[in-house]
Amino acid sequence: MKNTFIKKHPYIAATLAGLLCTFMTALGVAVPQIAGLKEYSIHAAATVFLLISIAIGILIMKRSKNSLADYGFKTSENRSISKVWWYIPLLAIEILPIAVYGFRPEITPVQYIILALFTIAIGFNEEIYFRGMALKFLMEKGTTKAILGSSVIFGVLHLINALNGKNVLYLVLQILFAFLVGFVLSEIASITKSLWIVIVWHAAHDFISNTTSDSLDSTALIILAVQVAILIVYAIGIWKKCSVHEGTK
């Protein structure tokens, strides 16, 4: 996208980046399903589409006047939030379903590898568009508006995933979870000026979600509610560090 357009219409530019990411992901899942492929073959085929989407995203970045480092392809600039203990809440979110359900025993080693590649591609793809491009574009409006705006775009475009649930409360919690994930990851990216931490966590979260229980029982509802609570506390806890960067472009 041209820098002049981004400066004049950052919200439109950020939304278009999110829509492109969402479209490529949906296309990657829909095409193999239409072709009649089975579950893990769908994941393998979708990974190819995600890699194409990643290539497109990187090409867009490289064609702009900014370097890839400006979009977050560098190590953290903030050592105070680079320590492992800063991410204990995020680790707790992922340990919770593993501790309660464990990994699904029916998944074979080959299927684990396919899921790992698939979720790494998802994490990389979504982060370069939502925290790489969208957040960067919205920084024209300041850090606070960038974090809020990119989080709303991320949450809204993940509504289709939430519709897989049947319980109304579960749907609400999923929507809130998606918004909070976008909010927290945007906070981290704005503080560190790096995508690597958010890519790793995003990929790990999707991998664990795909390899632990997929039931929608009362236990799953409780786990999701606890995860939402953790994200709320964590988002509030690191907000002050984001405020220090207010106005950062």
Image (cartoon, rainbow, N blue to C red):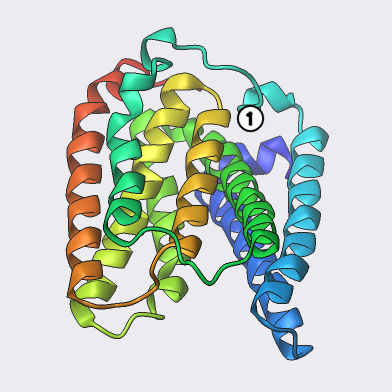
**In what quadrant of the picture does the N terminus appear?**
top right
Q: Name the residue at 61% across, 27% down.
A: 72
Q: Position of residue 198 (x, y in %)?
A: 50, 36
**Left or right of 113: which side holds 196?**
left
Q: Above or below — where is 217 with respect to 69?
A: below
Mark 1 lies on residue? 71
Whether residue 184 is visible here, answered yes or no, is yes
Q: Position of residue 24 (x, y in %)?
A: 70, 65
Quarter of image, res 244: top left
Name of the residue lying farthest toward the top: 79
Q: Nearer the viewer, residue 90 or 57?
A: 90
The secondary element bearing badge 1 is classed as helix
Q: Residue at x 66, y 64 (%)?
A: 111
Give the residue type at disc 1.
Tyr
State whether residue 247 is above or below residue 57.
Answer: above
Q: Position of residue 132 (x, y in %)?
A: 59, 37
> Dot 1: within a 10 Å radius of its alpha carbon, few (fewer than 14), some, or many (20 or more) residues?
many
Q: Quick check: 62 above or below 47? A: above
Q: Quadrant of residue 145?
A: top left
- The answer to whether residue 182 is left or right of residue 217 is right
Residue 246 visible somewhere in the drawing: no
Q: Nearer the viewer, residue 218 or 193?
A: 218
Q: In the image, 85: left or right of 203?
A: left
Q: Relative to 219, is 217 above or below?
A: below
